[in-house]
Amino acid sequence: MDTKDLLKKVRKIEIKTRRLSDHIFSGEYHTSFKGRGMTFSEVRQYQYGDDIRNIDWNVTARYNEAHVKVFEEERELTMMLMVDISGSESFGSKNQFKKDIVTEIAATMAFSATQNNDKIGLILFSDQIELYIPPKKGRSHVLRIIRELIEFEPKSRKTDLGQALKFLSSTQKKKAIVFVISDFMCEGYDQTLKIAAKKHDITGIRVYDIREQSIPNIGMVPMRDAESGEVALIDTGSKTVRFNYEKHYNERLNYFKETFSKSGSGVVNTRVDESYVTKLLGYFKSR
């Protein structure tokens, strides 16, 4: 992709996702993910209805009139976007690849965080850490993240979420809001998620295609494994083959749901042909 095409694509995604974050997500994001606590702001005269527990007795004694301490929420947070860029993300059956939706969701979340003056960082992972962008603020920083999401070419096509979560824990010492965006067609990350979720507020956003759930009976078909690159001739006419395919898919799906649930992390499931806006809004409101 040449620079002109890349900039055009970045701009297109910015216009779409910024509109969503400005008008829909910023308020929901703000109420869903609270700041680290309350910080002292000022002292003012007591008004009817104020909580008497907030009376500042020293100031009250000095002025011989009741005064209360005013606190405000300490809003600044760090958002980490952990994005799966393994081979399986290039799958798509309805003129829309999973990675396109993943990019849009990540951009929307980043602009929502920017609206709240939060820092945003990025981890692109396969079975290794492909790219790490430390958390920073600002529009130009978000645009860099979008550029990397569009054009970054991974060294590996495989997936290892456990490695990515270990990296998260080692680099982010303070609590962060973490969105893991993936199809979660991998296992073996239960322990690392459990450890990371003790410190961070983690949400898994699963992006999937309906065609991945089962294979139709269309006879002998050459199929390429998206992550290993191997091609094999598959007899889709075999009930056993179709059953085993669905069983494997459902095992991975159940592992994802159970592992995230046990760690206390949130879960969002969105199909490529569905509105991720509706899914994310529903999730934010349910928190």
Image (spheres, rainbow, N blue to C red):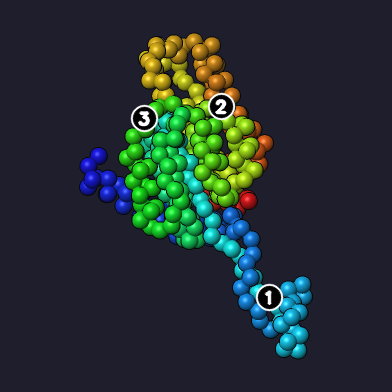
Q: Quadrant of residue 261?
A: top right
Per the image, label 1 sits on a secondary structure element best described as: strand
Gap in angstroms between the C-alphas marked 3 and 2: 20 Å
> Which disc, if any, is residue 234?
none
Mark 3 or 2: the one toward you: 3
Along the horizontal axis of the image, is 105 left or right of 172?
A: left
Q: Is residue 151 visible?
A: yes
* Dot 2 or dot 1, earlier in sequence: 1
Front-most of residues 273 and 258? 258
> CA gap, disc 1 to disc 3?
55 Å
Q: Residue at x 74, y 80 (%)?
A: 58
How far across and how far down the image is residue 82, in percent? 48, 41
Q: Residue at x 62, y 45 (%)?
A: 199
Indicate which disc, 3 or 2, sits on the residue closer to the N terminus: 3
Q: What residue type is disc 1 on?
A: Lys
Q: Are marks 3 and 2 in contact (CB under 8 Å)?
A: no
- Give amino acid for label 2: Glu
Q: Is residue 260 above or below residue 36?
A: above
Q: Earlier in the sequence, mark 1 or mark 3?
A: 1
- Horizontal side of 10 relative to 34 (left or right) equals left
Find residue 173 and report its horizontal and vertical position in percent: 56, 47
Q: Position of residue 214 (x, y in %)?
A: 50, 23
At 32% from the left edge and 49% from the top edge, which residue is drawn?
A: 10
Which labelled disc corresponds to residue 187? 2
Q: Secondary structure at mark 2?
A: loop
Say which residue label 1 marks: 69
Mark 2 and mark 1 residues within 8 Å of each other at the beta carbon? no
Q: Which label sits on residue 155?
A: 3
Q: Position of residue 120 (x, y in %)?
A: 46, 52
Q: Is residue 272 visible in this depiction of the protein? A: no
